[in-house]
Amino acid sequence: MTTDITLSALAIGYNTRKGPRTVAQGISATIAGGELTCLLGPNGAGKSTLLRTLAGFQPPVAGTATIAGRDITALKPADMARLVAIVLTEKPDTGSMTVAEMVELGRAPYTGFWGLCSSADRDVALGAMQCVGIAGLARRRVSTLSDGERQKAMLAKALAQQTPVILLDEPTAFLDFASKVEAMRLLHGIARQTGKAVFMSTHDLDLALQAADTLWLMKPGGVAAIGSPEDLALDGRLAAFFDSPAMRFDPATGLFAVCPAGAEPVTVAGEPGPRRAMLCKALLRNGMAGGDAPAEVSVEVGQDGFTVRRHGSAAHAATIAETVRKIMEIKN
């Protein structure tokens, strides 16, 4: 069974000495259960403010947000704790806690006044640790964990809370690339397998494009676009949102590539495939744009290497690195 979050004309912000300050407004959308939804946008757009509002940490400025049809402003903290789990960017102050002890904190909404875990609560916590692959770390001190292990422990705590909604603020911020990929795959799997609504903010654009079911593109003032990565790519809204001379969107791959200013054209000939794609990637990194259009310098991609030509002269190279050097030499 899935649970949706529905926003209607929602305005978010915070109080100042001069009164409420609205960060974003007019947000009307649904965050679907059973999906991983990624919130993308520049710093200051209001991503964290939106997450904090949905978690009940601060009230909406206007409009409504409901979870399973229940207005979040009417929910008591105990009710909210059974509906929403949140994983923040900040590293938790866990003192000398073990991983198991921290994960068991996720059972707090169910343990009553004294906060004592029953054997059933401990079984739920163990199941959460097994789900994220850290059952073997249960007796380790949290303070001894790597960033990736700590993030998994925080996610296990959220799973132990057994809520239909999980909100995450930059959950991959401190992770190495392999751990980022693993975390995104894990979150997508959790959403799919459990029906939970998993809603996260991130700056890992390429990973979000590959892992998310739905993207929210948030700009200062509100949400600019919502849709699947593929639909947003096809209708041009994705490229338009991240429009910058420093990068370009490649519709063939559905990803962004660094685009140096004033990239010089280079004709790249040969059958499409990994060798040609990797050559174009290397050219782009070195301030050149490989393509089909005629240019002063051309490269023929062959089975036994690469042939660089300019004004009738030619030079052969066996590797891409050597090809780039040959192009630099032949241009000079």
Image (cartoon, grey):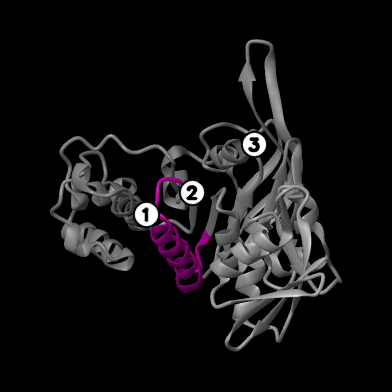
- At 25% across and 62% down in the image, what residue appears? 134
Whether tag 3 and tag 1 are in contact, CB under 8 A, the answer is no
- For marks 3 and 1, give the CA distance: 23 Å
Whether tag 1 and tag 2 are in contact, CB under 8 A, the answer is yes
Q: Main secondary structure of the magenta part?
A: helix
The circle on residue 155 is: 1
Q: In the picture, residue 90 is in which quadrant?
A: top left
State the SS at label 2: strand
**251 sits to left or right of 101:** right
Q: Position of residue 216 (x, y in %)?
A: 68, 53
- At 17% across and 57% down in the image, what residue appears? 138
**45 sits to left or right of 157:** right
Residue 175 on the magenta span: yes
Mark 2 vs mark 3: which is more N-terminal? Answer: 3
Tell me which segment is drawn in magenta. 173-197
Residue 54 on the magenta span: no
- For marks 2 and 3, give the CA distance: 14 Å
Give the residue pinned by disc 2.
168
Q: In the picture, residue 294 is in which quadrant?
A: bottom right
Whether tag 2 and tag 3 are in contact, CB under 8 A, the answer is no
Which residue appears farthest toward the left when viewing the image? Answer: 139
Give the residue pinned by disc 3.
46
Q: Is the residue marked by circle 1 packed among few (<14), some (14-19), or many (20+) residues within 10 Å? A: many
State the SS at label 3: loop
Q: Is 303 located above or below residue 95 in the figure?
A: below
